[in-house]
Image: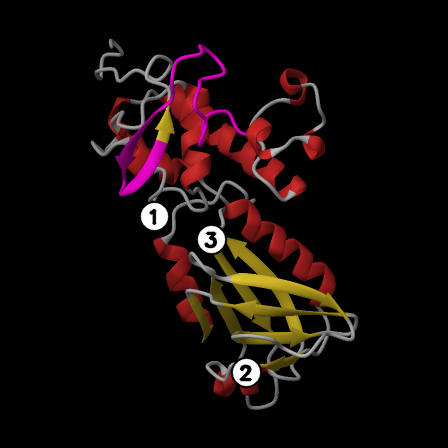
């Protein structure tokens, strides 16, 4: 499933390529046909990312209120972009959007729906702060984590705690902080939480810039981030050995997902800080 950096990158690119244009919207597959007619020919006002959710805000039109197209890609959703003229749609294209110079197809999303502003706000309200948003309030995440006995590996996947973090980022950030995936949230100090939050801001921002998850430092690898392969970009996820101590990486199921961690660097400690 795409993590938050991918969604914010899409929002950035689609703001650049389509905002301010009257767009042609269709549903070659047919499953979104009725809704597509409601926004076809209307001007796109903005594209917004929140965690793993995309919102395309359309301007008001005669006898039509402001409307938002809400997309959540889930496990199988994909965008494919084209320069015009776009090729004929192939396969199960849920939505095709065509602008003045570019177009894109959307296939297989988990969610693709039209919402009013009240419904959009309801989604925002159920999500935790997104480290990539300027309006993010980390205090909301700290309040939930500091009072929770749940494992950090579970809390980081909970979009109501922090929005946008997925399986790769949670493994990597816990490794960087030397926190065991099953470390209870309420055992973290405020300083540890602040470091966690800043790491997420930095790593997700790097992900948006390069359109891929990059955790390793260029100095350590000896390559610029754009030249690193997948093995080099990550430190623990799907690795066999810990780059910090050479211990064998272990896996566990935490939050119903497999997580990779170093048993030597990321030892489980009690609330007092002792192992």
Q: Which residue is mark 1?
A: 160
Bounds of the magenta segment:
234-259
Percent position of residue 199, x then y: 51, 28
Secondary structure at numbered mark 3: loop
Residue that numbered label 2 is attached to? 36
- Asked if marks 1 and 3 touch (Cβ < 8 Å), the reply is no
Q: Nearer the viewer, mark 1 or mark 3?
A: 3
Q: Tag 2: Cα neighbours inside 10 Å, few (<14), some, or many (≥20)?
A: many
Q: Earlier in the sequence, mark 1 or mark 2?
A: 2
Q: Secondary structure at mark 1?
A: loop
Q: Nearer the viewer, residue 254 or 230?
A: 230
Mark 2 or mark 3: name the one nearer the start of the chain.
2
Say left or right for 122 vs 149.
right
What number is the disc on residue 52?
3
Q: Is residue 190 left or right of residue 106?
A: left
**What residue do we see at 37% from left, 22% from top?**
190
Q: How many marks?
A: 3
Judge left or right: residue 260 versus residue 40: left
Report x, y in % for residue 250.
Answer: 33, 24
Q: Position of residue 106 (x, y in %)?
A: 56, 68
C-alpha distance separating marks 1 and 3: 12 Å
Tell me the residue at 54%/82% (across/down). Answer: 36
Point 32% across, 33% down: residue: 153
Q: Earlier in the sequence, mark 1 or mark 3?
A: 3
Q: Callout 1 environment at 10 Å: few (<14), some (14 to 19), or many (20+)?
A: many
């Amino acid at each position: 499933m795409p993590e938050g950096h991918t969604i914010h990158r899409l929002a950035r690119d689609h703001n650049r390529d389509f905002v301010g244009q009257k767009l042609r919207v269709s549903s070659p597959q047919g499953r979104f046909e009725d809704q597509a007619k409601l926004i076809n020919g209307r001007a796109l006002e903005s594209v917004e990312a929140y965690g793993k959710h995309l919102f395309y805000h359309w301007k008001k039109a005669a006898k039509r209120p402001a409307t938002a197209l809400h997309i959540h890609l889930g496990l199988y959703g994909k965008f494919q972009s084209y320069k015009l003229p776009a090729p004929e749609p192939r396969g199960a294209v849920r939505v095709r959007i065509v602008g003045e110079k570019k177009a894109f197809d959307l296939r297989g999303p988990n969610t693709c729906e039209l919402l009013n502003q009240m419904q959009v706000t309801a989604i925002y309200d159920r999500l935790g702060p997104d480290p990539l948003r300027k309006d993010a309030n980390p205090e909301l995440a700290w309040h939930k984590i500091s009072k929770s006995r749940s494992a950090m590996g579970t809390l980081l996947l909970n979009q109501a705690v922090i929005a946008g973090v997925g399986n790769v980022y949670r493994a990597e950030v816990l490794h960087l902080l030397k926190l065991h995936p099953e470390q209870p949230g309420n055992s973290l100090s405020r300083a540890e939480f602040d470091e966690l939050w800043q790491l997420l801001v930095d790593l997700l921002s790097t992900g948006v810039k390069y359109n891929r998850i990059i955790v390793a430092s260029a100095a350590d690898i000896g390559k610029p981030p754009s030249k690193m392969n997948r093995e080099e970009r990550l430190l623990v996820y799907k690795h066999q050995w810990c780059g910090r101590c050479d211990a064998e990486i272990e896996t566990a199921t935490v939050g119903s997902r497999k997580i990779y961690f170093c048993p030597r660097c990321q030892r489980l400690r009690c609330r007092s800080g002792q192992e």
